[in-house]
Image: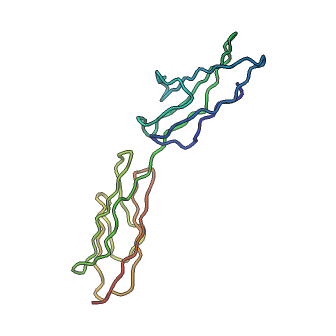
Amino acid sequence: MASVKLAPTLVFPGTRIKAQVEVSDPDGDLVMLDYKWTRNGAVLDGEVSDGLDTDAFQKGDLITLTITPSDEKAQGKSKESRSIVILNRPPEIISSPSGKLSEGKYIYEVKAQDPDDDRLAYSLEDGPPGMKIDAAIGRLEWEVPAEPGGSVQVRIAVSDGDARAFQGFSIQLKKE
């Protein structure tokens, strides 16, 4: 057996992993392959093909494939793939900012979700003086200056501890 590779190299829960195998037989015989997938060192019973679905897997799981070739006469030497770690999926901001000012205040309830159910933390990356965001719940607040005019740029981030998502927008300020 020349090589065993797993593709793709970046794998998230739900990604299908496929074995890429280069094999030949010196006698030109038909080569059969035995696939043995492991997750965190434990053999995955029933997974005996060149592909593996990771729908039920979690970030941090370590996946490895061992392939053993054989022909009608003999069994060849097993070869193990490089291990792949199931990666964290980034959070996603699912709300849209309001462009409305109410009673001299701008309030926006930022809503986000994380496909790995990680705890989220919100932060204000860019905004006007006095604007703040509650890191735990994503409530953005700003006392609008008495003489508004023009627009301000805002950039919010949400983090799951490993990855981040961003949302940028502008607030149009109009004089009454």
Relative depth, front residue between 90 and 122:
90
Give me the residue at 55% from left, 44% from top.
Answer: 10
Relative depth, front residue between 74 and 104:
74
Q: Is residue 150 left or right of residue 175?
A: right
Say how many tags the image has: 0
Give me the residue at 68% from left, 11% from top.
Answer: 72
Give me the residue at 66% from left, 13% from top.
Answer: 75
Please state the horizontal and vertical placement of residue 89, each as a whole percent of the image.
44, 48
Residue farthest along the right direction in this orientation: 27
Residue farthest along the top direction in this orientation: 73
Q: Is residue 116 left or right of residue 137?
A: right
Which quadrant of the figure has residue 84? top right
Please state the horizontal and vertical placement of residue 176, each as a whole percent of the image.
27, 90
Please state the horizontal and vertical placement of residue 46, each as a whole percent of the image.
47, 22
Give me the residue at 57% from left, 34% from top.
Answer: 18
Figure check: 133 above or below 31: below
Relative depth, front residue between 165 and 7:
7
Q: Is residue 111 left or right of residue 155?
A: left
The N terminus sits in image quarter: top right
Residue farthest along the left direction in this orientation: 103
Please state the horizontal and vertical placement of residue 86, each as a whole percent of the image.
49, 39
Figure check: 176 above or below 11: below
Figure check: 83 above or below 11: above
Which quadrant of the figure has residue 112? bottom left
For the rendered model, the colour scheme is rainbow
